[in-house]
């Protein structure tokens, strides 16, 4: 850093440089090092004090040297010092980037036509603009080669990658924000922790009418394949959330259960399917067929019960 920079730039720049280097080199996980390790705050304070101390020492050395100068030397020194803050490099840079002619020199570039007193200057193209133009050309060439010659990737691929990445993020987000589920987004939960939470919700709220094993009493049998209000996780969630048919006794549980809890108990209810309760109530409603199940044609329809068995098997495995 040139000695011409004033202290109020020198100190902050050095300070933030050290700060940046510290953050770069100290591995502190997600949080910045300054928060993760409070000792670094102390370190930075020390750095700041040392920087200020150096400035003070330099200033006093300068002062002592100044006193030793002759009168003439003092004058010259002060003259040079006041020049310090003129930012000559900024001015030079501006000059280089614009190449404007000083107003006094405009005579040199004036064109010889004259429209009612309006005259034109023959200025050069401003270099900042020309450089920008070159940059766009270079950009264009690189772009052409990358995407039209080599064909690195296209929009479709980029789209797919971003959607895939976003899906992962959504999964991640859902895991932490389970209460966002509603009837449209609810999915069958298979985690043992979710299912045991669902079971305890069932035991404390639902057994009075559905029995502990789901065999049914006031409420219908939840273990058979027949459903009054539709089977499958979405319908079951909806019945629990909004209640059964009016006047039948099944209230809307959304008042007292959180969405995540309703998803858990709904998933637990689904796992009751196919189990054999002690006193099963006779089936009510219609046989539920999953409309999302893979379509099977007639010749393969025999395979279907087997598939269903497999499905219940796998949910039971998940339950374990
Ligand atoms: C006061 C008694 C009662 C309680 C408590 C109760 N239910 Fe029900 N439940 C019923 C009745 C009655 C129906 C039938 C509703 C209908 O006919 O529309 C029903 C229906 C259902 C259905 C739909 C069954 C079908 O065939 O469509 C599900 C699922 C269900 N209840 C789950 C639960 C869950 C989970 C709980 C606990 C959070 C619960 N119920 C608590 C009485 C009850």
Image (tube, grey):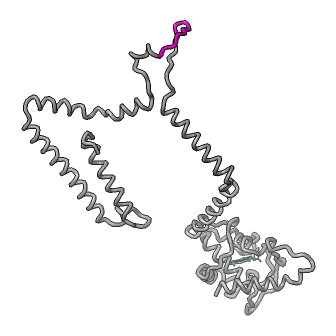
Q: Which residue is rendered at x = 26% and y = 39% of the image?
A: 4
Q: Which residue lies furthest to the top in this view?
A: 116
Q: Which residue is rendered at x = 10% and y = 28% of the image?
A: 72
Query: Which of the 4 quarters of the picture holds residue 63?
Result: top left
Give how far across and how far down residue 306 sits, in percent: 82, 86
Q: Does the magenta stretch include residue 115?
A: yes
- Is residue 123 depicted above or below 250 in this figure? above
Q: Which residue lies furthest to the bottom in this view?
A: 278
Of residues 20 and 131, the one drawn nearer to the viewer in this rendering: 131
Instruction: Please state, as top left, top right, bottom left or bottom right, where the N terminus lies in the image.
Output: top left
Q: Which residue lies furthest to the right in this view?
A: 299
- Is residue 227 depicted above or below 22 in this figure? below
Query: Which of the 4 quarters of the picture holds residue 196?
Result: bottom right
Q: Can residue 204 be seen in this view?
A: no
Instruction: Classify the position of ligand 1 by quadrant: top left, top right, bottom left or bottom right.
Output: bottom right
Residue range (magenta): 109-117
Q: Is residue 54 left or right of residue 132?
A: left
Q: Is residue 279 visible?
A: yes
Of residues 16 and 90, the one drawn nearer to the viewer in this rendering: 90
Give how far across and how far down residue 190 sits, in percent: 65, 79
- Is residue 296 depicted above or below 317 in this figure? above
Of residues 51 and 128, the one drawn nearer to the viewer in this rendering: 128
Of residues 288 and 295, the one drawn nearer to the viewer in this rendering: 295
Q: Which residue is rendered at x = 72% and y = 75% of the image?
A: 249
């Amino acid at each position: 850093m040139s000695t011409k920079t004033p202290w109020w730039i020198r100190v902050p720049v050095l300070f933030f440089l050290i700060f940046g280097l510290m953050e770069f080199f100290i591995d502190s996980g997600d949080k910045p090092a300054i928060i993760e390790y409070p000792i670094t705050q102390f370190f930075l304070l020390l750095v700041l004090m040392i920087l200020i101390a150096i400035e003070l020492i330099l200033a006093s050395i300068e002062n002592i040297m100044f006193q030793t100068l002759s009168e003439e030397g003092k004058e010259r020194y002060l003259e040079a010092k006041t020049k310090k803050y003129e930012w000559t490099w900024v001015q030079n840079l501006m000059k280089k980037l614009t190449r404007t002619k000083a107003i006094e020199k405009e005579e040199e570039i004036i064109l010889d036509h004259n429209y009612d007193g309006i005259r034109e200057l023959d200025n050069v193209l401003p270099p900042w603009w020309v450089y920008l133009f070159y940059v766009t050309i270079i950009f264009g060439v690189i772009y052409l080669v990358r995407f039209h010659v080599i064909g690195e990737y296209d929009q479709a691929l980029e789209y797919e990658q971003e959607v895939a990445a976003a899906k992962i993020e959504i999964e991640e987000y859902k895991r932490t924000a389970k209460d966002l589920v509603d009837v449209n987004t609810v999915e069958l939960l298979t985690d043992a922790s979710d299912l045991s939470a669902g079971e305890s919700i069932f035991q404390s709220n639902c057994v009075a009418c559905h029995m502990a094993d789901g065999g049914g009493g006031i409420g219908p049998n939840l273990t058979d394949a027949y459903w009054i209000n539709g089977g499958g996780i979405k319908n079951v969630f909806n019945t629990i959330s909004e209640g059964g048919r009016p006047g039948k006794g099944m209230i809307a549980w959304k008042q007292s259960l959180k969405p995540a809890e309703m998803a858990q108990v709904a998933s637990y209810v689904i796992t009751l399917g196919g189990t054999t309760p002690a006193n099963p109530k006779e089936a009510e409603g219609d046989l539920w067929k999953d409309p999302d199940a893979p379509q099977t044609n007639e010749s393969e329809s025999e395979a279907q019960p087997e598939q269903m068995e497999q499905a219940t098997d796998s949910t039971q495995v998940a339950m374990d």
